[in-house]
Amino acid sequence: MYENLVSEAFEAMKSAYAPYSNYHVGACVLCRDGRTFRGVNIENASYGATNCAERSAVFGAYSYGYRKADIAALAIVSDGARIGTPCGICRQVLSELLESDTPIILSNGKETMETTMAELLPMSFGMEDLA
Ligand SMILES: O=c1ccn([C@H]2C[C@H](O)[C@@H](CO)O2)c(=O)[nH]1
């Protein structure tokens, strides 16, 4: 499932700006109305200012007014030897910006798997903790 979404994430990956790690990541958000938002990793000479592909894609959707209830799925792909999973910062961000059961499809072109934020970041800290 989500073959088109995964293909679009691989298409996005071609635009990754990763001159330091040479690890290219592409992401694509599918909204319930069919609209898609791409993201890529964008590195920086300061290293710490690097932005990951999945955050870029979800920020893109939010920038057009979409919210977690409007997001149907997220694909994250990379050209690594094994399937890449979101970094800790992305897990924290995505746990707030996606529903806990939204399908997240991960692929490196050789293998593909599906997961959710509930699986990737159980017992997460969030908005409810600040109430
Ligand atoms: O889930 C991930 C993991 C890493 N990266 C990027 C950050 C950096 O540019 C490169 C190596 O960490 O990959 C992502 O975009 N998403």
Image: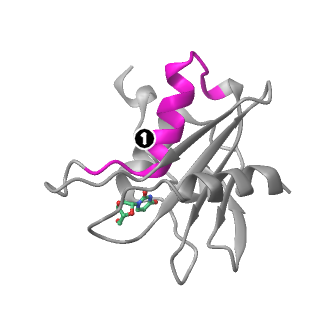
The answer to which image quadrant residue 30 occupies is top right
| Residue 64 locus on image (x, y percent) | 56, 18
Q: How is the image coloured?
A: one colour
The quarter in which the N terminus is drawn is: bottom right
Q: Specify whether tag 1 is near ligand 1 (CB below 8 Å).
A: no
**Residue at horizontal 40 percent and vertical 51 percent from the top:** 52
Check disc 1: other Cα within 10 Å, few if <14, some if 14-19, many if 20+.
some
User: Which residues are drawn in magenta?
Assistant: 50-68
| Residue 34 locus on image (x, y percent) | 79, 30
Number of marks drawn? 1
The answer to which image quadrant residue 107 occupies is bottom right
Looking at the image, which is closer to me, 112 or 16? 16
Q: Secondary structure at mark 1?
A: helix
Left or right: where 114 falls relative to 93? right
Q: Which residue is mark 1?
A: 93
Q: Is residue 60 magenta?
A: yes
Which amino acid does the dot numbered 1 rest on? Val
**Residue at horizontal 60 percent and vertical 22 percent from the top:** 67
| Residue 19 locus on image (x, y percent) | 30, 65
Ligand 1 placement by image quarter = bottom left
Residue 2 in sight: no
Magenta part mainly helix, strand or loop? helix
In the rendered view, tell whether residue 126 sits above or below residue 2: above
Q: Is residue 61 magenta?
A: yes
Give the residue furthest to the right: 1
Give the residue furthest to the left: 46
Residue 46 in sight: yes
**Residue at horizontal 42 percent and vertical 40 percent from the top:** 93
The quarter in which the C terminus is drawn is: top left
